[in-house]
Image: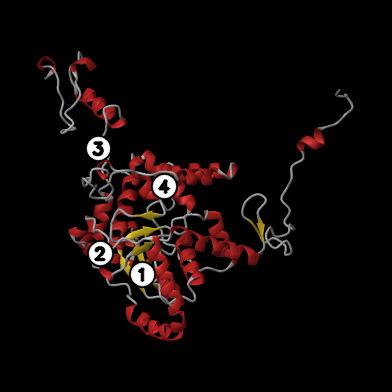
Amino acid sequence: MCQVEEDYNDALEHQNVPCISKKCLKCKELTAAVVIRAGDPYCRDCFKEYFIHKFRAMLGKNRVIFPGEKVLLAVSGGPSSCSMLSQVQQVFAISTILCFDIMNPSCKGGAVGQSVEERRKTVAELQTVFKATGFPFHIVPLEQVLALPSEVITTVPPSSQRTASAYKAAVDKFTNELKFIGESSNSRATEQEEKETLFPDVPESETQLLQQLITSAKTLTARQDLLNTLRQHLLVHTARTEGYSKLMLGDHCTRLAIKLLTSISLGRGAQLAQDTGFADLRFGDVIIVKPMRDYSAKEIAYYNHMFSVPTVFTPNLETKTTEKASIQRLTESFVTKLQADFPSTVSTIYRTSEKLQTVAKGSSTGHQCDRCLLCMCSLDTDVEKASAFKATLISEQLSRTKSPRASSTNIQSPNPGDPHSIITNNNDLC
């Protein structure tokens, strides 16, 4: 029975504050240098080992990249892509079979209004970072997207299907060729010097044309979406022309969680599996992989700070904008603020995206589905009667009817072959 004199306030109001002198969770010996999540303190060495192991596990679990394949890294200079570049150096330090090249497609200073001097300064900083890695690199201005051929919006079937047995055979071959590391590294160093592609001079007319294209979109949401689409087309085209079969992006789980909610808001729910999955097969011959998708933005920031990973800041369309400037910016603000109060927010959204899978209607019959010319995803306009798309069509028909006596009984279901067909009584036509 409770007593009046008993005081439970101190016990109830006491909160366990994380102590900075905690021992490392893994080695149990050294003092923790970083706390990733509540109850997960790591020392410096164990955190680095944990970070690299996660990258290895992501590639080994999916078995998408085979030894001997050419891989193109898309590095914009941001924290995530530069951290990915650092992981490739750490993980494949002894590997000369995998041919990694660096491409920077984010020299989009023309799209955001940067001057020529600012763009040259950014390019010089990127060249310094890329040359330190020892990999060949290509720096491509975004203006080159205006001269892309029409083949970039076509799906090219892959040259061959890779199976689990083929992966094992490729690994065995790689193991046998390790004894030739010294000779191949010398020849590769010469190849790197020859393949470095510097930033070309961009005519002012192309920069103005690109700016007109971006500003033709009425909202910042549409501009950002258009810019991402152009950047993706430029990446895939460069990978095809240079002979790369894999393309690595630096999307981390925080960014993918934001992209998932943003895509739902923009009506791209049917394309979520391709936009947020580890391997994106929409282009056929070039597979886009996201090896950083298990890392949070916090983990990447800690790693870059502790191990001095160089980064280059490049402004984008959303730089210095308010949180309500676009749907992407608003979703980012919502997720980050919710993550601050509930640390499992990003991981919950991210784990949900892993369970998504899109099955095209024509996949079972062998019929080739129509694809969007912008994102190259399968169109989702062939829907059943009871669907949100059908409801949107009926609502659009009602709003277009000018007669005040028009009702839902006068409007029948549209022809499935013509999504814009409207069947009404003649008396209701103006």
Across and down, in percent, residue 254 comes to 49, 50
Q: Residues within 10 Å of mark 2 (few under 14, many from 20)?
A: some
Q: Which residue is mark 3?
A: 381
Q: How many marks?
A: 4
Secondary structure under the numbered disc 4 in the rendered image: helix
Q: Relative to residue 205, is residue 99 drawn left or right?
A: right
Image height check: is 257 above or below 299? above
Image height check: is 90 above or below 414? below
Identify residue type, mark 2: Gln
Q: Which residue is mark 1?
A: 69
Precedes in sequence: disc 4 or disc 1: 1
Q: Which mark is residue 291?
A: none
Identify residue type, mark 4: Lys
Secondary structure under the numbered disc 2 in the rendered image: helix
Precedes in sequence: disc 1 or disc 3: 1
State the residue in front, 256 or 428: 256
Precedes in sequence: disc 3 or disc 4: 4
| Picture quadrant of residue 238 | bottom left
Identify residue type, mark 1: Glu
Across and down, in percent, residue 369 comes to 23, 45
Across and down, in percent, residue 188 comes to 39, 81
The residue shown at (47%, 64%) is: 84
Disc 1 to disc 2, how far (Cα)? Answer: 26 Å
Q: Which residue is mark 4?
A: 259
Q: Quadrant of the N terminus?
A: top right
Across and down, in percent, residue 218 comes to 28, 44
Disc 4 to disc 2, how far (Cα)? Answer: 26 Å
